[in-house]
Amino acid sequence: MIYTELTVKAMKIAYNAHHGQTDKCGVPYVFHPFHLAEQMKDEYTVCAALLHDVVEDTDTPIEALESEFPEPVVNAVKLLTHGENEDYFTYVRRLKSDPIAKAVKLADLEHNSDVSRAALIGESTVKTQERMKYYAEAKRILAE
């Protein structure tokens, strides 16, 4: 993790925004964005990783981030926010041109593809395999 005033601000926002949320395994949700942020190589990408689900999965509006973070971070978070009625693969194609959003999404897909996490969810093997194919297609799109 890269520690700067900006990344610490993003950590606090992610922590507070995801407070009380758990992932499908029952783990506090905030560990997911922190896991992604640990893999990022620069300040803006760390911030985007920490904030990548804040707008999509909490009541935090994008406007709250616009006044706190530089434009490249905010743009990446906007791109990483999957629209409610947006086709998933259209969404993936839309974000792949932004290097920050692409790096975060690749780490997100990798973490979501972790079979040890999948085993804890308790879903069927068939459903897990289908989900893994879905993520593999998203990774393929990002690699194009």
Image (cartoon, rainbow, N blue to C red):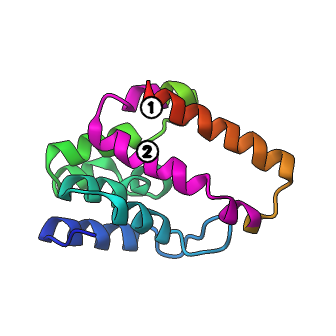
Q: Nearer the viewer, residue 139 or 19?
A: 139
> Which image quadrant is residue 17 in?
bottom left
Q: Does the stretch in magenta take in 101? A: yes
Please name the residue shown 28% across and 38% down the image: 99
What type is the residue that disc 2 sits on? Lys
Q: Is residue 139 above or below residue 109?
A: above
Q: Is residue 123 above or below residue 25?
A: above
Please state the horizontal and vertical placement of residue 131, each as a whole percent of the image.
71, 43
Which one is in front in this view, the residue at disc 1 or the one at disc 2?
1
Q: Is residue 14 above or below residue 48?
A: below
What secondary structure characterizes most of the magenta part?
A: helix
45 horizontally vs 85: left or right: left
93 horizontally vs 22: left or right: left
Q: Secondary structure at mark 1?
A: helix
Please name the residue shown 31% across and 48% down the image: 62
Q: Secondary structure at mark 2?
A: helix
Please name the residue shown 86% across and 54% down the image: 124
Q: Does the stretch in magenta take in 32? A: no
What is the quadrant of the N terminus in the image? bottom left
* Figure label count: 2
- To which residue does mark 1 refer? 142
Q: Nearer the viewer, residue 57 or 10?
A: 10
Q: Nearer the viewer, residue 83 or 63?
A: 83
Instruction: Bin the neighbour count of mark 2 within 10 Å (Cα to Cα): few under 14, some 14-19, many 20 and up.
Output: many
Residue stretch in magenta: 92-119
Identify the disc placed on residue 105.
Answer: 2
Please state the horizontal and vertical placement of residue 42, each as a whole percent of the image.
20, 56
Please name the residue shown 68% across and 65% down the image: 116
Please state the horizontal and vertical placement of residue 85, each as a whole percent of the image.
57, 30
Q: Nearer the viewer, residue 117 or 19?
A: 117
Q: Are dots 1 and 2 in contact, CB under 8 Å?
A: yes
